[in-house]
Image (cartoon, rainbow, N blue to C red):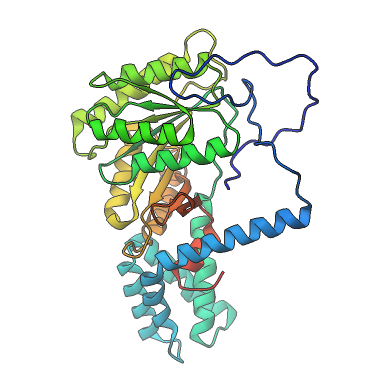
Amino acid sequence: MFSFFRKKPPAPIPAAPAPAVPAAPVGGRIGSALGQALPVPQAPATPAESATSGTATRSGWFGRLSAGLRKTGSSISQVFTGTRIDDALYEELESALLMADAGVAATQWLLDEVRRKVQATGASNPAQVRNILADLLTQLLAPLEKPLVIGQHLPTVIMVTGVNGAGKTTSIGKLTRHLADSGATVLLAAADTFRAAAREQLAVWAERNTVEIVSQAGGDPAAVSFDAVSAGRARGKDVVLVDTAGRLPTQLHLMEELKKIKRTIAKAGDAPGAQGSAAPPHEVLLVIDGNTGQNALAQVKAFDAALGLTGLIVTKLDGTAKGGVLAAIAQWGQERAKTQAGAGPVPVYFIGVGEKLEDLETFKAREFALALLGQDG
């Protein structure tokens, strides 16, 4: 379902058999050879069949996303039901965007640009204003649209963080499933050693997806992470996913522990046999609950300051979440790029609208903007 692998040209099949992959200690699955990220073998589809299948899949996803954001979409759509473009319309639009958790900065930018575009284009009815807003929101969100790339480093080490209840471990399970279905060999690291239920939950996902897991009850999270990265390298895994304990950014001693885990993972990457120029973790993902509104932006800022985030997973955009916080995150990313050399927006790799496997998908700025405004894709 996801297209986040670095594409490689097909290579001829060698006559000699590939080296054997070490046996997996916990229900492991023999995957691609070390250094490869190969698709699961299947009957080739014609271009027409592939296009139809992809369009249908994305269309179904857009429907679920629109249903999840229906409350916000309805509120904003009501702004454009009148017949005049006047100050009252702009005031209602401002209130609707703020109520959608877009934040003051993003709301002000959108309003200023809408007014400018309306004047420049000579728009004369509210429906045209709605289309202008959709284009501007897409423009604002576009820098957040970026694919997750697997295969530049072997293994690609992904550290996943987040507060309790954000859906972190469940998101890891879904991501594991999609990675495995796409042909990548995955190793899970149960570095959330404080909560037994987290290890058990991750173990269930490992068994369900037929992937290996490194776990230690009551062990040191950094030590578990080190062992997992070392094991992933030794066993030729494509990806090592490190689950960490949920914590609030105000819990400074626990945030320090996250920094320790990251440093320890980097040390594991310095060991003999490590491949790739960049030290792990190669991705540091934050899972945020779409229901938390502006608090989600505060979490992004705090975790980024502590760890240097490379991507986000936004969960639970399923009815009660307002969704506009992504506009606030995008606006913050633009401001950060202006004040910090080399910094830029933190991309949103995936968004989720429910608990089912198919309810997690790659983020597309245009379809999110349309869903947020209650428009058809």
Q: Is residue 138 visible?
A: no
Which residue corresponds to the image point at 78% horizontal and 52% vertical from the top-left? 46
Check the image and report above or below for 93 versus 18: below
Which quadrant holds residue 40? top right
Where is residue 25? Give x, y as percent: 45, 17
Q: Is residue 334 visible?
A: yes
Check the image and report above or below for 138 versus 363: below
Which residue corresponds to the image point at 35% horizontal and 65% vertical from the top-left? 319
Q: Tell me the quadrant of the picture where the C terminus can be found.
A: bottom right
Left or right of 133 in this view: 59: right
Where is residue 79? Give x, y as percent: 40, 81
Left or right of 103 in this view: 8: right
Viewer-nearest residue: 49 or 290: 49
Residue furthest toward the top? 272
Where is residue 36? Give x, y as percent: 65, 26
Viewer-nearest residue: 309 or 231: 231
Where is residue 208? Give x, y as percent: 44, 36
Left or right of 203 in this view: 257: left
Which residue corresponds to the image point at 61% horizontal and 44% vertical from the top-left? 3
